[in-house]
Image: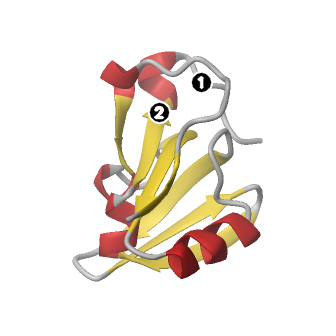
Amino acid sequence: MAGVPGNNQAVDMNHVKPLSDLERSQEGRIAAIQVETPEELQCLTQAGAVPGAQVYMMHADSRHVLFFAHDVELAVDHKIASGILVEIASMAGVQTVS
């Protein structure tokens, strides 16, 4: 399993949930990433999906998740999205994406 722990920003783990569980239009900040392979992790980080990045949920179904990270639209498999842990803006006072 490949992963990136959260960065040095304080994260309230009581307000963290998988990206795949966010509802449409929910916003937050990536707290940590746990994926199956180093290649998956590399693709995410190259696209800007890294701990501390602001995210905005666009759409999720049983197979895919569509979201914005650093103003880049990303689509990932539901399984990968389950490993992207997000601190929810409305629950933790995270600044919203503008």
Amino acid, disc 1: Val
Q: Say few, some or many: other residues with alpha carbon within 10 Å of mark 1 (under 14 / 14 to 19 / 20 or more).
A: some
x 50%, y 44%: residue: 32
**Among the 4 quarters of the image, the one containing residue 64:** bottom left
Q: Which mark is residue 13?
A: none
x 52%, y 29%: residue: 89
Q: Mark 2 points at which residue?
A: 87
Q: Where is residue 20 in the image (x, y as percent from the top left)?
A: 33, 59
Q: Nearer the viewer, residue 88 or 39?
A: 39
Q: Name the residue under label 1.
A: 94
Q: Say few, some or many: other residues with alpha carbon within 10 Å of mark 2 (under 14 / 14 to 19 / 20 or more).
A: many
Q: Quote the CA–CA distance across marks 2 and 1.
A: 8 Å
Q: Where is residue 48 in the image (x, y as percent from the top left)?
A: 73, 61
63 with respect to 81 (left or right):
left
Q: Which of 49 and 68 is in front in this view?
A: 49
SS at badge 1: loop
96 to 94, vertically: above or below = below
SS at badge 2: strand
90 with respect to 62 (left or right):
right
Using the rendered image of the protein, determine whether residue 81 is visible from the camera's viewpoint. yes
20 to 11, vertically: above or below = below
**Among the 4 quarters of the image, the one containing residue 97:** top right
x 28%, y 75%: residue: 61
Amino acid, disc 2: Glu
Q: Which of 3 and 88 is in front in this view?
A: 3
Q: Position of residue 38 (x, y in %)?
A: 53, 74
Callouts 2 and 1 close, C-beta under 8 Å: yes
Of label 2 and label 1, which has the lower sequence position?
2
